[in-house]
Image (cartoon, rainbow, N blue to C red):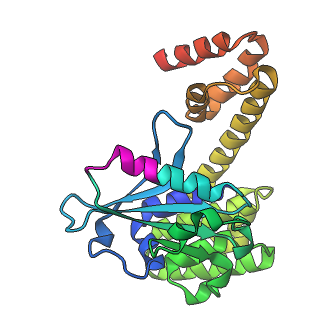
C-alpha cells in the first residue's frame, strides 16, 4: 500500500491536520502551506514541510515524517534532512518543530542514544497510530490516518464506511475521495464495481478510484524499470532517477521497451533528454 502517497494527499488537502498532533500549534496553523521538499545536491527528500504564512508572527517551520516500516537509519536521515533544509533557508525561519508518525512504537530505531538530546528537546513529537484509539472517536482527518494502519480487512471496511458516512453528512468530498483511495490500495485485487458495492458508494464519477488505480500502475512500472536499470548498470546518478520518478505511465511503458537496447548509461540519459525536449 502506498501510504506515502496517501499521507501526501492528506496533508495537501488538510495541512492543518498535522497540528492536531501538536500540543502547542502556532496561531496561524490554518494558513500553513504544505510541501514535499527535495533538498538540492543530495538524495534527501523530506516527507512533509509545513511552511508558515508570510505574515506569521513566529516563523516556525514544521517537519513531518511518516514511517510504516523499520528503518534503523530513520533518525540519522530525518535530522540530516531537517538541518540541511534549515541551513539552506536560514534567513527565512526562526524556529522548527518535528512530528514523526509511526504505525507502531515497534518501528522506532533500536538505538536512539545518539539523538537523545533532540528527541527529548521538546521540539520533536513522536506519534504512534496504533495507540491513538478507535478511529470512530477521532476527528475525520485523524480517522483517515488510522484507517491507513488498519490490517484487518473487516475492520478496514467498517472503518471506511463510518468515515464515508461522516464525510457525506459534512459534505466533505475530499474525505470521501481519500477514504476511497485508501480502500483501493488495500484491496487492489478488486474491481471498481466491487469496491463501490463493498463501501456502499454510488459515485457517478469514481475519480478517486481511477486515480488510485493509475498511481498503482505507475508505481509498479517505475519500480520494475528502476530494478532493471540497477541490475544492468548498478547504482546510477540521482539526477537520472529523479527524471524517471516524474515520467507518466505511457512514458514508462515506452522506456521499458527502449531500455532493452541500452548498452550504457549514456543511452538512458539521451533517451530522457529526448523526452524532456519532446
Left or right of 212, for residue 122: left
Residue drawn at x 70%, y 64% is: 109
Residue 219 falls in image quadrant:
top right
Residue drawn at x 51%, y 58% is: 9
Residue drawn at x 54%, y 85% is: 138
Of 193 and 240, the residue lying toward us? 240
Magenta run includes residue 90: yes
Residue 278 x, y percent position in the rendering: 49, 16
Magenta run includes residue 224: no
Residue drawn at x 47%, y 73% is: 121
Residue 199 x, y percent position in the rendering: 68, 73
In this view, which residue lies farthest toward the bottom?
137
Left or right of 235, for residue 245: left
Residue 270 x, y percent position in the rendering: 59, 11
Q: Is residue 187 above or below residue 16?
A: above
Q: How many marks?
A: 0
Residue 36 visible somewhere in the drawing: no
Residue 171 visible somewhere in the drawing: yes
Quarter of the image for the N terminus: give it: bottom right
Residue 116 falls in image quadrant:
bottom right
Residue 97 falls in image quadrant:
bottom left
Residue 235 x, y percent position in the rendering: 72, 27
Of 92 and 259, the residue lying toward us? 92
Q: Which residues are magenta?
A: 83-91
Of 123 and 247, the residue lying toward us? 123
Q: Main structural element of the magenta stretch: helix, strand or loop? A: helix
Q: Is residue 30 above or below residue 265?
A: below
Amino acid at each position: 500500500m502506498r501510504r506515502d502517497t496517501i499521507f501526501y494527499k492528506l496533508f495537501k488537502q488538510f495541512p492543518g491536520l498535522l497540528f492536531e498532533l501538536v500540543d502547542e500549534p502556532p496561531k496561524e496553523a490554518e494558513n500553513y502551506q504544505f510541501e514535499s521538499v527535495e533538498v538540492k545536491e543530495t538524495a534527501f527528500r523530506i516527507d512533509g514541510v509545513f511552511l508558515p504564512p508570510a505574515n506569521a508572527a513566529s516563523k516556525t517551520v514544521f517537519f513531518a515524517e511518516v514511517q510504516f516500516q523499520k528503518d534503523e537509519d530513520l533518525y540519522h536521515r530525518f535530522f540530516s534532512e531537517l538541518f540541511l533544509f534549515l541551513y539552506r533557508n536560514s534567513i527565512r525561519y526562526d524556529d522548527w518543530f518535528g512530528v514523526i508518525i509511526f504505525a507502531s512504537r515497534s518501528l522506532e530505531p533500536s538505538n536512539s542514544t545518539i539523538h537523545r538530546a533532540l528527541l527529548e528537546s521538546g521540539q520533536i513529537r513522536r506519534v504512534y497510530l496504533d495507540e491513538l484509539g478507535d478511529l470512530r472517536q477521532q476527528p475525520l482527518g485523524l480517522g483517515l490516518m488510522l484507517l491507513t494502519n488498519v490490517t484487518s480487512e473487516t475492520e478496514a471496511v467498517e472503518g471506511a464506511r463510518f468515515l464515508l458516512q461522516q464525510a457525506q453528512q459534512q459534505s466533505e468530498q475530499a474525505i470521501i475521495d481519500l477514504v476511497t483511495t485508501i480502500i483501493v490500495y488495500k484491496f487492489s485485487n478488486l474491481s471498481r464495481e466491487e469496491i463501490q458495492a463493498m463501501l456502499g458508494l454510488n459515485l457517478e464519477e469514481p475519480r478517486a478510484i481511477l486515480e488510485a488505480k493509475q498511481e498503482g500502475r505507475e508505481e509498479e512500472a517505475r519500480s520494475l524499470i528502476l530494478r532493471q536499470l540497477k541490475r544492468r548498470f548498478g547504482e546510477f546518478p540521482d539526477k537520472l532517477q529523479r527524471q524517471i520518478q516524474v515520467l507518466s505511465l505511457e512514458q514508462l511503458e515506452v522506456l521499458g521497451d527502449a531500455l532493452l537496447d541500452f548498452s550504457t548509461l549514456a543511452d538512458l540519459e539521451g533517451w530522457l533528454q529526448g523526452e524532456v525536449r519532446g
